[in-house]
Image (cartoon, rainbow, N blue to C red):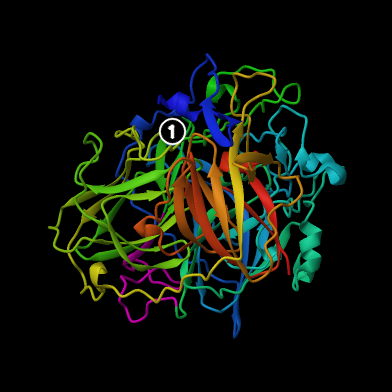
């Protein structure tokens, strides 16, 4: 099936009790762009010249006997993302307000310990030197169902009417993705807040609909004040790889693309490995300059740039399919929202196509797919310019997913990660001669991901990620070879007391039948027929506290979606084509996860125990989808 045809919305019909799908008619204009048109051509960006930046540890504001306390703000600054000689880029990022020089893209890593609480005052500091608010770096579509501060108290968290990009004060709320925490500390999309700026326009809502609700509910809500929220994380779950990022209703794509994201690594407890069996160390507070690290987090993202170094992001729907309008609110086609976005440049830890020196020994990498829409398929190759597919030169040993360690190490020739998925992996460079060059490449497509790709990323640009250069060994490697690792005991979940049938759909325009999609939705399924729902519709997922359920995700669209459920870590049960039998999860999905790939035309089943009461969300982690209705609240009753 041609890529454009594959991408389009699948019309859903019911015949004799079966679900039938057929592609919608195609718009006669240009297809979705595989390589965005930022004015800086990625081919002129020099590769493997800039050294990889390993994010340092975030320093706490204070440490007491029972608590690590941080005061972390989001600020605007300039950073050299492109190689030297090219302009710096204005970005946003997190940093400690008590420690100069910690503001970075991506943010410094929060190191947490098992059952030792972390408390964070998350501060919206998007203001200039005079205390006036800073407008957004990127275009924000005001016609979506979004935070909508200009709507005031009565119309916040609703669809706006202006077709112009939003230029007012920016709302944020931080979510620690993968953390097991109460709803008042989870970063609910309608619990956003504006900066404490001196020039907030009259009539603007300063906080989202649920900000005061959670402030009053939180046992530390008295610590919240204008322009911030204070969240606490119990860290009562197995050791795992988490990350923190903005989660504001209807504008997460723009906020995260601007830069605010970082790792949150939880260690210790019975779910961790002790005694130096894994490569290390990782960055810690107080490390001496020049410390060598053998555990390294890698945040891989795609971006596009302009000649002046600024971030490029589409300002109109015309970028996606050429549709010139009329747009919402005159029609049902959003003026700025694009169904997906694929940058033409790969950025790792805030640098384009970096290089890193490795010794001939084992390394542990915590890999995050931090892309907006792009699925990544990693391989280790000796030459990044070879025709795809490339035969790998080294295996990737996966030892953990989002929820912690796998039951056993899995040897992979390639590593598939959807947006927001994480992989805890070991790469063994032992025995490689000094001077050897190994390249981390990407064979995922420059387009929506339908499954095993029939096209590959551009081998000259987005098909390359970073380079490893082997240097001489400086110390003895005491870690255990990955094939011989005994990982912590894995305890599967018990039987489920309830099964829910849930839908993933895309909708074309009613006003212009050839334009699709204009909205993406979650919902329910009855008799094989999807019932798409909006964010504002009544809650339909309401598990009882401490019960285990299976959620069946019916994907009626043409492409795969990464589905994330807040509060829980789940097990993948199986996948089943609409017209076939079930198959087990992949070997690398046999542990606990918080994000799962739901392939098109299939039912993906996950099992979770809902053990904290409150109001949470579940959503697609393609950020454009999340921001245009592919997110639903759910309530744990207890």
User: What residue lies at 54% left-to-right and 68% top-to-bottom?
Assistant: 495
Foreground of the two, 451 or 419: 451
Q: Percent from the top left, x then y, of residue 79?
A: 49, 47
Magenta stretch: dominant SS?
A: loop
> Taking the image as drawn, is residue 86 in sight?
yes
Quadrant housing residue 272: bottom left
Q: Percent from the top left, x then y, of residue 426?
A: 30, 63
In this rendering, is residue 82 above or below 197? above
Q: Percent from the top left, x then y, of residue 181?
A: 63, 68
Q: Secondary structure at mark 1?
A: loop
Quadrant housing residue 521: top right
Left or right of 560? Residue 137 is right
Disc 1 marks which residue? 447
Foreground of the two, 271 or 280: 271
Left or right of 212? Residue 259 is left
Q: Percent from the top left, x then y, of residue 202?
A: 86, 42
User: What residue lies at 82% left-to-right and 47% top-to-bottom?
Assistant: 205
Residue 291 part of the magenta-drawn span: yes
Q: Which residues are magenta?
A: 271-298
């Amino acid at each position: 099936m041609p890529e454009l045809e594959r991408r389009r919305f699948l019309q859903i019909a019911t015949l004799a009790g079966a679900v039938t799908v057929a592609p919608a008619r195609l718009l006669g204009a240009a297809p979705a762009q595989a390589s965005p048109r930022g004015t800086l051509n990625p081919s002129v960006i020099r590769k493997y010249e800039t050294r990889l930046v390993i994010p340092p540890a975030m320093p706490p504001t204070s440490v007491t006997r029972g608590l690590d306390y941080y005061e972390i703000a989001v600020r605007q600054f300039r950073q050299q993302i492109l190689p030297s000689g090219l302009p710096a880029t204005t970005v946003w990022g997190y940093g400690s307000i008590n420690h100069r020089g910690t503001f970075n893209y991506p943010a410094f890593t929060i190191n947490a310990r098992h059952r030792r609480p972390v408390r964070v005052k998350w501060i919206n500091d998007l203001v200039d030197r005079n205390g006036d608010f800073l407008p957004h770096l990127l275009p924000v579509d005001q016609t979506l169902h979004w935070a909508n501060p200009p709507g005031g108290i009565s119309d916040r968290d609703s669809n706006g009417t202006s077709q112009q990009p939003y230029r007012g004060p920016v709302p944020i709320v931080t979510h620690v993705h993968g953390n097991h925490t109460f709803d008042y500390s989870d970063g609910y999309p309608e619990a956003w807040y504006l900066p404490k700026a001196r020039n907030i326009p009259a009539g603007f809502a300063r906080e989202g609909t649920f900000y005061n609700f959670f402030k009053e509910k939180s046992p530390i809500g008295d610590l919240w004040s204008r322009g911030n929220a204070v969240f606490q994380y119990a860290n009562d779950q197995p050791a795992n790889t988490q990350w923190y990022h903005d989660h504001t209703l209807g504008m997460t794509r723009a906020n995260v693309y601007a830069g605010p994201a970082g790792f949150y690594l939880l260690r210790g407890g019975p779910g961790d490995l002790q005694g130096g069996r894994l490569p290390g160390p990782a960055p810690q507070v107080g490390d001496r300059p020049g410390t060598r690290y053998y555990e390294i987090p890698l945040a891989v993202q795609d971006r596009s740039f302009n000649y002046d170094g600024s971030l490029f992001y589409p300002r109109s729907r015309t970028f996606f399919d050429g549709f010139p309008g009329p747009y919402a609110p005159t029609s049902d086609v959003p003026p700025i929202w694009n169904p997906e976005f694929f940058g033409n440049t790969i950025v790792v830890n805030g640098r384009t196509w970096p290089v890193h020196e490795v010794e001939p020994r084992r390394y542990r990498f915590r890999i995050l797919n931090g892309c907006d829409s792009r699925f990544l398929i990693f391989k280790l190759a000796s030459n990044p310019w070879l025709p795809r597919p490339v035969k790998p030169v080294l295996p990737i040993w996966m030892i953990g997913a989002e929820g912690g360690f796998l039951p056993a190490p899995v040897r992979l020739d390639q590593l598939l990660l959807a947006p927001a998925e994480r992989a805890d992996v070991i790469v063994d460079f032992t025995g490689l001669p000094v001077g050897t060059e190994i390249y981390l490449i990407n064979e995922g497509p420059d387009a929506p991901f339908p499954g095993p790709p029939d096209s590959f990323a551009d081998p000259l640009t987005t098909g390359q990620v970073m380079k490893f250069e082997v240097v001489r060994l400086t110390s003895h490697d005491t870690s255990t070879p990955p094939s011989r690792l005994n990982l912590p005991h894995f305890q599967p979940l018990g039987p489920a007391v309830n099964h829910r049938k849930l839908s993933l759909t895309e909708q074309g325009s009613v006003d212009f039948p050839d334009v699709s999609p204009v909205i993406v939705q979650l919902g329910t399924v009855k008799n094989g027929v999807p019932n798409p729902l909006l964010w504002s519709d009544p809650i339909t997922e309401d598990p009882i506290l401490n019960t285990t359920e299976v959620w069946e995700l019916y994907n009626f669209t043409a492409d795969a979606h990464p589905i994330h459920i807040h509060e829980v870590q789940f097990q993948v049960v199986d996948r089943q084509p609409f017209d076939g039998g079930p198959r087990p999860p992949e070997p690398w999905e046999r542990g606990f996860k918080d994000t799962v790939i739901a392939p098109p035309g299939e039912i993906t089943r996950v099992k979770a125990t809902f053990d904290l009461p409150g109001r949470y969300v579940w959503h697609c982690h393609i950020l454009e989808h999340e921001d245009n209705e592919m997110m639903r609240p759910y309530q744990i009753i207890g």
